[in-house]
Image (cartoon, rainbow, N blue to C red):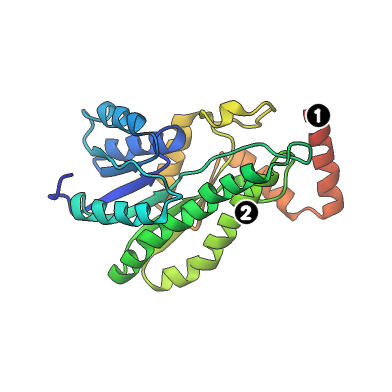
Amino acid sequence: MNKAKRDCVWITGASSGIGRALALRFAKAGETVVVSARNKAALEALVEEAKDLPGIIYPAPLDVTDAAAVAACVEEIEAGAGRIRQAVLNAGTHKPMGSEDFDLAALKALIDVNVMGTANCLDAVMSRMIARRSGRIAVVASLAGYRGLPTGAAYGLTKAGVINFCEALRPDLEAKGVVLQVVNPGFVRTPLTDKNEFPMPFLMELDAAAEAFFKGLQSDRFEIVFPWRFAYVMKLLRILPYGLFFAITRRIAGSAN
């Protein structure tokens, strides 16, 4: 890593999908980017793709569920690439789950990655930024965290928890000079959403989503959402009374069966 750089951007879950696209977008803007994921080969391919861009991408393979490994990774990044100015905690996974295919092991796996993996990364960078009284952290949740939706019993649980987590921490971190944002995407065309076997309204192309993500990170607003049309639908669902909400989700569940 290049010690001449004074700061860098750290992105987890960067081996594919929106994390990968966002890393390239930062590199196009001339930033030094450190990318983490479990797939070392995919990270190395990303580094190769970015070699002619104004910025530079460094790989830092990592399993975010390993708290000690996360702490060591952040230590190495700051010793090599520079202080982490912007952390994008994007690592996550998804598995559709309802009553018939309820699986405790799969639920625990989602919690380990989506919730505890996020917490491990937050723990590793938060104290450093507080000590410096500067820094930015973006945590990727989902519009699926707004309300319980059919097949989303496990995924929605984790994302709702992450949203609540960030809401609770935002005022405290703000007072300490650290900007905390939550990113709530809708459906974006990625390898993860390619697994979905149901209609995905307002499906957004990856490059457009990465651009919306990047622009949102330049602001200080708490929530970054895209695509907006789907966000409006989900925000409406969030305020509906249960009777009307369940009438809608019964129809959704029925059309999926």
For the N terminus, the quadrant is top left
Q: Which mark is residue 245?
A: none
Q: Is residue 225 above or below residue 42?
A: below
Residue 70, percent from left and from top:
36, 53
Label 2 neighbour load within 10 Å: few <14, some 14-19, many 20+? some
Q: Is residue 220 visible?
A: no
In the image, farthest residue toward the left: 4
Where disc 1 sits, the SS reads helix
- 91 or 31, nearer to the observer: 91
**Disc 1 residue crowd, few under 14, some 14–19, many 20+, Cα 10 Å:** few
- Coordinates of residue 35 in the picture (x, y in percent): 33, 41
Q: Residue at x 62, y 39 (%)?
A: 229
Say what amino acid the circle numbered 1 marks.
Ser
Q: Is residue 159 left or right of residue 174?
A: right
- Give the spatial CA distance, label 2 vs label 1: 24 Å
- Element at badge 2? helix
Residue position for label 1 = 255
Disc 2 designates what residue? 160
The disc, 2 or 1, on the residue closer to the chain's N-terminal end is 2
Instruction: Look at label 2 and name its amino acid.
Output: Ala
The residue depicted at 63 percent of the width and 49 percent of the height is 145
